């Protein structure tokens, strides 16, 4: 029987949920930081790069999501490091922003995106701290929801 996560889901489903949360965040970030600004700039006749907020985090989020699914030996350290770093960076940015918020379409998109990124990494950090065994190597992704730990099940 699979262990339960903080949300009451089986271990494999919980970690798969976190991985997919990261994939969705990466896609959303690419849209609001690249595609939307490029489309807007082109629509009003501005240079296409004018409103882009350059950001490498979507690549990191996809890497971490992939790692949650395949469970490399470095997963625990990667998840812990990125979660702490993201929470720290976003908290500092929020502290600066909320002193004198600028609620333009650009900053509002940024803020809403960061709220969801912060929520994702709080969930991930909670998992890392409270249930580190969920991230151990050898518990591979299986779309059927079962966790396989390198054992072959007999058909008997």
Image (spheres, rainbow, N blue to C red):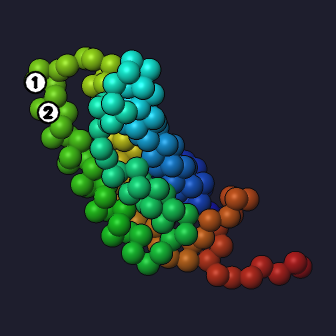
Q: Which residue is mark 1?
A: 99
Is 82 displayed left or right of 36 in the figure? left
Q: For residue 113, which numbered disc appears in the image?
A: none
Q: Residue at x 74, y 82 (%)?
A: 152
Q: Which residue is mark 2?
A: 95
Residue 117 at x, y percent in the picture: 37, 41
Q: Residues within 10 Å of mark 2 (few under 14, many from 20)?
A: few
Residue 96 at x, y percent in the picture: 12, 32
Residue 49 at x, y percent in the picture: 33, 36
Quarter containing the N terminus: bottom right
Residue 101 at x, y percent in the picture: 17, 20
Quarter containing the C terminus: bottom right
Dots 2 and 1: beta carbons under 8 Å?
Answer: yes
Q: Residue at x 48, y 66 (%)?
A: 67
Query: Residue 50: which quarter of the image?
Result: top left
Taking depth in this image into account, of 71 and 102 the one nearest to the observer is: 102
């Amino acid at each position: 029987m699979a262990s339960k996560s903080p949300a009451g889901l089986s271990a494999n489903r919980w970690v798969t949920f976190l991985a997919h949360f990261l994939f969705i965040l990466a896609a959303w970030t690419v849209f609001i930081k690249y595609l939307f600004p490029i489309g807007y700039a082109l629509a009003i006749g501005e240079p296409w790069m004018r409103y882009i907020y350059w950001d490498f985090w979507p690549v990191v989020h996809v890497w971490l999501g992939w790692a949650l699914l395949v469970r490399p030996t470095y997963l625990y350290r990667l998840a812990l490091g990125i979660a702490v770093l993201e929470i720290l960076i976003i908290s500092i940015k929020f502290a600066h922003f909320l002193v004198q918020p600028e609620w333009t379409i650009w900053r509002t998109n940024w803020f809403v995106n960061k709220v969801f990124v912060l929520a994702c990494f709080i969930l991930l950090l909670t998992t890392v701290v409270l249930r580190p065994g969920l991230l151990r190597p050898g518990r591979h992704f299986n779309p059927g929801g079962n966790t396989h730990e390198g054992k072959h099940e007999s058909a008997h």
